[in-house]
């Protein structure tokens, strides 16, 4: 224990905040995580962890914990339009499918086990994130544009049979991902660019997620039993990529920038940005770096690692939100076997 060292406060106990906390604790840094909610809790998420973030979890020694908690290796993906299906695509490396209900609670327990102080049901209300305080508060809202906005819905379901570990169904207003979890449960998660439903979506109204009658998505969910307690919705997402250097605070995860969810890479970015911030933060606590130095170094590291991938993901998301381009992508993906692996690799 270094008695003269400063402590780090992380605001937000989501994936970015908790993995940063674990990384700092493994470096012996005194760390507090302040979280507005509590654990376990359901989140709007595709629950599909892929990309470089898996290496971060390995580095923190967490992969085995995830597997013990029921994470399911996912090796295949298929794309669908209302009329077409792609062949089965093999992932270059297996992803992991784990419910956020278990994942967030597991990371919270690991952080506490590593000696971190976790304050749940505590909201940070100070507008300033000064020296020693990291913003990991998740996605930043974006107002309605032209009456439309991005909104996400997610629910767990039973009695759904999939033809791949992950099925991506493109719909006229966005997409719905079906991801096989442990225990015969399938995660049903959709992102839509539309006028949000007049009434706040409720567990009784998962029709947005069901797709058009006759479509493969509709067929998949015909016999589905939705688990109402797992239903969550989120609206007003901002998917435009941001450079870390534009941020005046030290930020990680979605608070830094949000990669369009269609890439299934947001959790990875949360883990990666946390890993990129940890070394400079540890140096700050010993007095080897000032706070502005931490901000600059973290921003440089994040921009170098993420900017190109974010730009590709943004164009992909734009294409999918433009009806005629979405129709083109939807037609090409099943027909051009190399298109999806190339797009996939560009966002990782
Ligand atoms: C529809 C949809 C589907 C997605 N699918 C996938 C997918 O399949 N794969 C993937 O990798 N990613 C996916 N993502 C993205 C992924 O969910 C996010 O990138 C990830 O959750 C970001 O983690 P985070 O820690 O930055 O934010 P969060 O997990 O949102 O955590 C932020 C935390 O901060 C807390 N907080 C906020 N404000 C305060 C405050 N003032 N005081 C205290 N606490 C506060 C919140 O309570 C929350 O717990 C998806 C996202 C959406 C919207």
Image: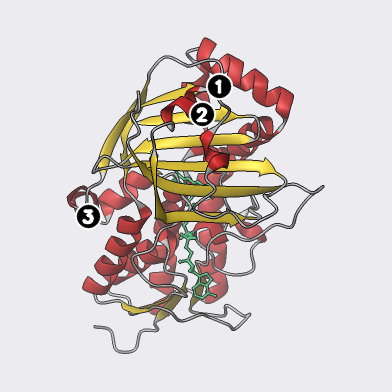
Q: Nearer the viewer, residue 336 or 195?
A: 195
Q: Residues within 10 Å of mark 2 (few under 14, many from 20)?
A: many
Note whether 95 is above or below 114 in the view shown: above
Which residue is label 2 attached to?
169
Inter-mark Cα distance, 1 to 2: 6 Å
Inter-mark Cα distance, 1 to 3: 39 Å
The label number, if any, that marks residue 61 in the structure image: 3
| Among numbered discs 2 and 3, the one appearing first in the sequence | 3
Picture quarter containing residue 119?
bottom left
Element class at badge 2: strand
Picture quarter containing residue 295?
bottom right
Quarter of the picture containing the N terminus is: bottom left
Q: Nearer the viewer, residue 304 or 82?
A: 82
Residue 31 appears at what percent x and percent y? Answer: 36, 77
The label number, if any, that marks residue 288 in the structure image: none
Residue 164 appears at what percent x and percent y? Answer: 35, 26
């Amino acid at each position: 224990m270094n008695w003269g060292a400063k402590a780090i406060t992380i605001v937000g106990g989501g994936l970015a905040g908790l993995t940063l906390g674990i990384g700092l604790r493994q470096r012996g840094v005194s760390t507090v995580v302040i979280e507005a909610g509590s654990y376990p809790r359901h989140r709007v998420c595709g629950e599909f962890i892929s990309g470089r973030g898996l290496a971060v979890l390995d580095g923190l020694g967490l992969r085995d914990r995830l597997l013990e908690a029921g994470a399911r290796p996912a090796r295949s993906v298929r794309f669908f339009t209302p009329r077409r299906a792609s062949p089965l695509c093999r992932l270059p490396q297996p992803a992991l499918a784990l419910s956020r209900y278990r994942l967030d609670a597991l990371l919270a327990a690991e952080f506490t086990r590593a000696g971190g102080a976790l304050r749940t049901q505590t909201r940070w209300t100070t507008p300033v994130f000064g020296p020693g305080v990291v913003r990991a508060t998740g996605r930043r809202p974006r107002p309605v544009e032209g009456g439309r906005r991005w909104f996400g819905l997610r629910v767990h379901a039973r009695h759904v049979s999939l033809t791949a570990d992950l099925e991506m169904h493109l719909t006229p207003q966005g997409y719905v991902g079906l991801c096989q979890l442990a225990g015969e449960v399938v995660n049903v998660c959709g992102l839509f660019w539309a006028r949000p439903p007049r009434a706040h979506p409720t567990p009784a109204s998962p029709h947005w997620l069901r797709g058009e009658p006759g479509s493969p998505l509709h067929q998949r969910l015909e016999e589905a039993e939705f688990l109402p307690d797992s239903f969550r919705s989120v609206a007003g997402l901002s998917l435009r990529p941001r450079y870390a250097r534009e941020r005046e605070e030290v930020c990680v995860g979605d608070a830094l920038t949000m990669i369009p969810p269609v890439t299934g890479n947001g959790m990875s970015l949360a883990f990666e940005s946390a890993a990129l911030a940890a070394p400079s933060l540890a140096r700050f606590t010993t007095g080897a770096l000032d706070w502005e130095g931490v901000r600059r170094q973290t921003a440089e590291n994040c921009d170098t690692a993420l900017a190109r991938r974010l730009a590709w993901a943004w164009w992909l998301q734009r294409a999918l939100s433009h009806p005629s381009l979405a129709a083109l992508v939807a037609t090409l993906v099943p027909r051009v076997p190399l298109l999806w692996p190339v797009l996939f690799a560009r966002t990782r």
